[in-house]
Image (spheres, rainbow, N blue to C red):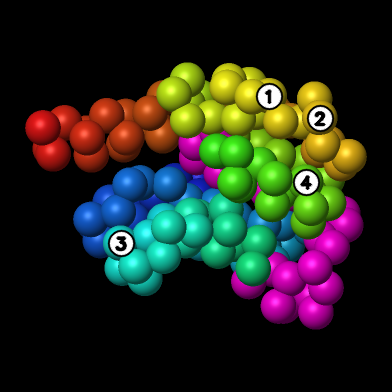
Amino acid sequence: MRRAIELARQAALAGEVPVGAVVTRGTTVIAEGHNLPRALADPTAHAEILALRRAGEKLSNERLDGCDLWVTLEPCAMCAGAISHARIRRLYFAAPDPKGGAVHHGPHLYDFLSHRPDVYSGIGEEEAARLLRAFFAERR
């Protein structure tokens, strides 16, 4: 999660919502990403989507069996769906997202999708939440 938080800081410095994501298999980092929707003019350029795309390219497979995803914010519906389609084994997220999250909040997508990763939350929550609060406080 430390690397995901570092990536979230990079996103904030670039003017993006501070979310970072890392795909691992065992102790090996396969791919990573941070939010880039503004820079890429792409509403799908969330940290999770970018990390999953890069992992798929690196492994030459759309199925990321045996891989885990570490992300600083509870995934939205789009990202939660992509995580399921990628067959991520375990999802670790830091901060909950009561408004936009789709794992423990909102639609609880994993109650309905065919593949459900094991989900662990709260790892690094304080630091990830602090980054998000500071980012949005600057913009108000």
Q: Which residue carries the number 1 mark? A: 108
Q: CA distance from mark 3 to mark 4?
A: 25 Å
Q: Answer whether labels 2 and 1 touch (C-beta < 8 Å).
A: yes
Marks counted in the figure total 4
On the image, the x and y values in percent for residue 29 come to 67, 63
Q: What amino acid is at disc 2?
A: Phe
**Of callouts 2 and 3, which one flags the residue occurring earlier in the amino acid sequence?**
3
Secondary structure beneath disc 4?
helix
Secondary structure beneath disc 3?
helix
Residue drawn 30% across the image and 62% down it:
38
Q: Which residue carries the number 3 mark? A: 38
**Of callouts 4 and 2, which one flags the residue occurring earlier in the amino acid sequence?**
4
Q: Which residue carries the number 2 mark? A: 112
On the image, the x and y values in percent for residue 102 come to 60, 30
Q: CA distance from mark 4 to mark 2?
A: 10 Å
**Residue 84 image label:** 4
**Residue 73 image label:** none
Q: Answer whether labels 4 and 2 touch (C-beta < 8 Å).
A: no
Q: CA distance from mark 1 to mark 3?
A: 27 Å
Q: In the rendered image of this protein, does residue 96 appear above or below residue 15?
A: above
Q: Which range is magenta?
A: 54-75
On the image, the x and y values in percent for residue 96 come to 51, 24
**Of callouts 1 and 3, which one flags the residue occurring earlier in the amino acid sequence?**
3
Nearer to me, 99 or 13: 99
Residue drawn 73% across the image and 62% down it:
28
Q: What amino acid is at disc 4?
A: Ser
On the image, the x and y values in percent for residue 45 come to 47, 61
Residue drawn 55% across the image and 38% down it:
76
